[in-house]
Amino acid sequence: MSRSGQPLDAFAAGLSEDVRATVADGAAATDAARRRAMETGGDSLADLRDTAAAIRQHALDHLDTYLAQAEASLTRSGARVHFAATAASAREQVTRILQEAGVRRLVKSKSMVAEEIGLAEHLTAAGTEVVESDLGELVVQLDGDRPSHIVKPIIHRRRDEIASTFRDHGLGDYDPDPESLTRRARAHLRRKFLAADASISGANFVSAESGRLVVVTNEGNNRFGAAAAPLHIAVVGIEKVVATDRDLSVLLALLARSATGQAITAYTEFMRGPRPPGRSSGPAAFHVVFYDGGRSRILGSEWREILRCIRCGACMNACPVYREASGHAYGGVYPGPVGAVLEPLLAADPDGYAERAGLAYASTLCGACGDVCPVKIPLPDLLVRHRVEATARHLDRARAGVPGTAAFSAVAARPGLWRLMLSLSGRLPAAWVERFAVGPLRRWLAQRTLPRLRGGAFRRWLRGSGGKDG
Amino acid sequence: MLMATCLCDTFFDDVAVSTVKVLRHAGCEVDFPRDQTCCGQPAYTAGDWPGFRRLVRRLVDVFAGDVPVVVPSGACAATLRHAAPQAFRDEPDLAAVEALAGRTWELCEFLVSGLGVRQWPGRLEARVSLHPGCHNWNTPVLDAARQLLDSVAGVERVEAEGPAECCGFGGVFSVAFPHVSGAMGRRRVAALMTSSPDLVVSPDVSCLMHQKGLARHDGKPFPAMHIAQLLNRALGES
Amino acid sequence: MADDRATIFAGVRHALDGRARAPRPSLPEQPATGRPAPGRTGGEAFLDSFRKAGGVVLDDGPSLGRWLAEQGEGAVYCDPAIASALVKPLEAAGLPVCTLFPRDDPDRVFAAITPATAAIAETGTLVLTDGETRDRLAAVATWVHVAVLDPGDVLPGLAASLAALPDDPNVVYVTGPSQTADVEGILIRGVHGPGVQACLPLAWRPEGDES
């Protein structure tokens, strides 16, 4: 692989055919399920995407109002609300809440914000037992692996590998049957749920009007975790706020269909405070940590539409580059088109941006991501805006392997020179070009045959055929 | 006015010739402004917007007037319609760019929606697989291309395997991501050839150049042509 | 931290300063696919979608007892609010019944019966609340969960349900059994929560109770 190339391409080139096929098949199957679910809804569902985009954009454009309203609503229902501007602050505040409550063991459901801030690793290092309760997250936790998809964390794993993982970690003998694997996870996690001193989750949405946090799972792991533990902490990005409960009907209908092809997720939980008096299960203490981590900066940038994202994963399922390269190729928390837009923006410092902005070139701009997005984020346009930024700021690392277009544009801006180059090229035998090609053209020709050079031929024909000019 | 595209100017004179013949057959007088070069898409996708704007401003001058501008490429048409207005969002000449975009047509779309062609004359016995080309999704171009193909006597349209996917060309993408681009292209070629069509056609020659380049490199048959060439061939022209 | 709060709000206000702000969109009355098939009432439409989501519909107390006896071994937890109507038929089927969930020995109980606050016809969803569920752990930790639903509590769609969510710290929409497709996309039921989700239509609220 060329040293001057993009890391994502090198990663993809080194990917085993097994992993590639597992990822590609999994993503394609989910994309097909999404398409079926959206089609059965007829026109009303297609129109609903416009409404969903408007709901999210409205909430973001009034985030100052709605975030304050969400805080007040949550406080009224007995929740403790915290704010964290940075990842370090979020980790510190969660740690303090846990310490004050004497928590030693906790279960955690899937949360992209927790991944962003490295919460599980941080708490584990500080001596707390953290158990991932989503089946896929449990597998990557046991293995020291990383999720490769935001909805299906182990889309890159096959059953036999999972069976080996479970055997190696004392969850039973080797048995790759998916049902047996699930039963073993059930038995293992039941004990963990019941012994936990706290549960941690993210939230898919927050209603400003009522303060309700919406947490969706199919496994019921958040429901179990928050029913069994006496303390719950939700770590939530500030952009998750929407105006009213009623808005959620639109967003939930699209989230489930876009993520898995379901009409609704099996467990859709609305949480807003501690358990009522006289109840023995459910958290007695309920905390919400609103996390910024660059979101307010993005809100003021020309990538602000990305904050509409509801983390359904449809863009990665639809993306042919994701399917070819896998989520790990993106090297961050968010893979696929949304990751290629978001990862450079979430990097807190300018060096981080330069390092991650190359992801914006990891797209053919085919538009599949934008077409499936339930909140109509113009993902290809946002990718191009990163490319413009990387070019204007001369971020060579981000542009690694990307051919400069300046020379071509310079010729194309001078019609006389263009015609001269055309007629010269028309006299070059293709074999010479292939033999003496340098730089980008050489790389391109390494696996393709160049068509015959016919510079100027059309213009000559046109003159001969009585056409105007040429 | 015909915008022939830089690729046709450099490699695919036969596509440009077919386009002229098809347009003339449909009753058009074809004007080819000689100072045209390229729509600027490479600069747009690479992120060089100052360079892109320079080329688009030239297009506004070169294609001045009020007659339709027809281009045998959905990608180039999309560059003018979708990309250029974004790059000119904060520029004083946005209106001029939008005006040009507003009278720019992809060839199939021009024939069907612009000229009202319902039935393409002539005959061609062929099983044809259509590569839509990503820029044509959710645009009238794809419907027009299907409609034209289906109207040609003797043409039987066969479906490629699976949902239509990008072939991985993407201009600068194919250079910066050679592995992924090549793998996507090979998969697309295989999908298009599943039903063993006599011809693979597309409204975009750039996709075909990439796919054909891969297939020829691998020594695999890939009988691809631009849709203008098929329409021209149906007329009994070579 | 107090400083963080001020920093975040200042950042948000700075980002929005002077910008045009998108208005609130009007929401469709019945956005998704929620209209019942012609000739079906709301209750029937709910049971149709509930079955489609993988749920089991039971007829009455005695058939509940007989069916449960085939589902597993051990005791059955019954929420105190509905115990008076159901303890007899359950015991008649030979099932030991408890009305306090044994948190320290949960595997002793294989099934839980709790009241549903409402249901949604569009999606086949049961709406459970803390207000009407004595022990939410019981409803999620057992292999079989039976929700007792008053047929008068069926709502047409998600929109209607979300427009009037109960004033409750915890509301959960349960649609079918607990499930996963994490392993190679293969659907498996009963991950952490119930592997079997059932519904017993029964007017369980005391007469005159309008809640």
Image (tube, helix red, strand yellow):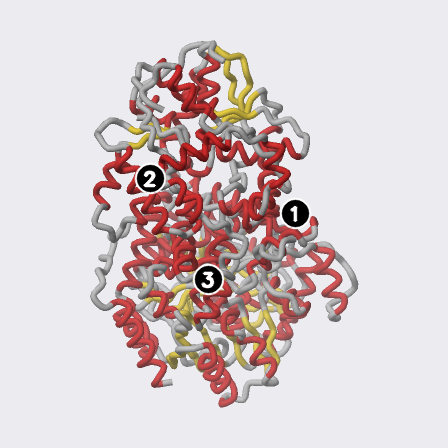
- Picture quarter with the N terminus of chain C: bottom left
Q: Name the residue furthest right.
A: A173
SS type, badge 3 = loop
Residue annotated with mark 3: A395
Residues at marks 3 and 2, CA–CA distance in whole angstroms: 27 Å
Chain bearing mark 1:
A
| Left or right of residue B50: residue A365 | right
Residue C134 appears in the picture as rendered: yes
Residue annotated with mark 1: A21
Which residue is drawn at the image coordinates 50% and 12% (left, top)? B124
- Going by the numbered disc 2, the residue's amino acid type is Leu
Residue A152 drawn at (x, y percent): 57, 57
Which residue is drawn at the image coordinates 43% and 63% (left, top)? A204
- Going by the numbered disc 1, the residue's amino acid type is Ala
| Left or right of residue A273: residue B162 | right
Chain bearing mark 3:
A
- Going by the numbered disc 3, the residue's amino acid type is Leu
